[in-house]
Image (cartoon, rainbow, N blue to C red):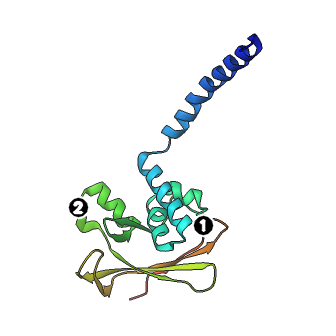
Amino acid sequence: MTKIDARIGGMVAAALCLIAPLTASADEAVSESDRFFLDEAASACRSGDFPAFLWPFANSKMVRERYGAPAASDFPIVMIDYSYVTSASEKLFEAKGDPRQLVTVQIDFSTPSVGAERVDWVPGRFEPGEGDGPGTLIEKIGPGGSLHFTKTADCWQLTKDIRNLPSAR
């Protein structure tokens, strides 16, 4: 190795040492949970599995930001265990620790046209069923909404978040 090669090698090593702490601190800003959800979303995108994509999308603001949700912090549903619940009820649950605060929602997936996915959701009371999930919807207990996604080159993007108004009684 010549003196010039050694000097260049030393400069490259010094540059890498300067860059490494920046990279590490940027990675530290991403929580382990968000890193997991980002990986799950990327996997669902690669496999073209939209229902598998919705779970990390609903549960991580960082995933929503990555895949272009207009209001990433105000998403109407989140999954807890094997059931979707309203985000508002999840916040109450986190604050009070009482699972009775959770309002379970029914989720229906549809593909209204090529390159489009739609998720209709409605809060309700459920009769327990077999397996995972909330069971059979027996009563709607509030307004729901629909989430519209458009296929992009490598995944999906939320294009509409329609929330139904409460009905007058």
Q: In this view, does 96 lie above or below 129?
A: above
State the image quarter where residue 55 is shown: bottom left
Q: Quadrant of the N terminus?
A: top right
Is residue 137 found left or right of 29 in the rendered image?
Answer: left
Q: In the displayed structure, would residue 44 be above or below residue 32?
A: below
Q: Mark 2 points at which residue?
A: 98
Q: Give the farthest residue toward the right.
A: 4
Q: x, y percentage for residue 37? A: 46, 56
Task: Tell me, yes or no, if residue 80 can be seen here.
Answer: yes
Q: Which amino acid does label 1 sit on?
A: Cys
Q: Residue at x 55, y 84 (%)?
A: 111
Query: Of the residues shown, which amino acid type is indicated by label 2?
Result: Asp
Q: Residue furthest top?
A: 3
| Disc 1: which residue | 155
Element assignment for label 2: loop
The part of the image, by quadrant, that contains residue 117 is bottom right
Q: For residue 159, which quarter of the picture?
A: bottom right
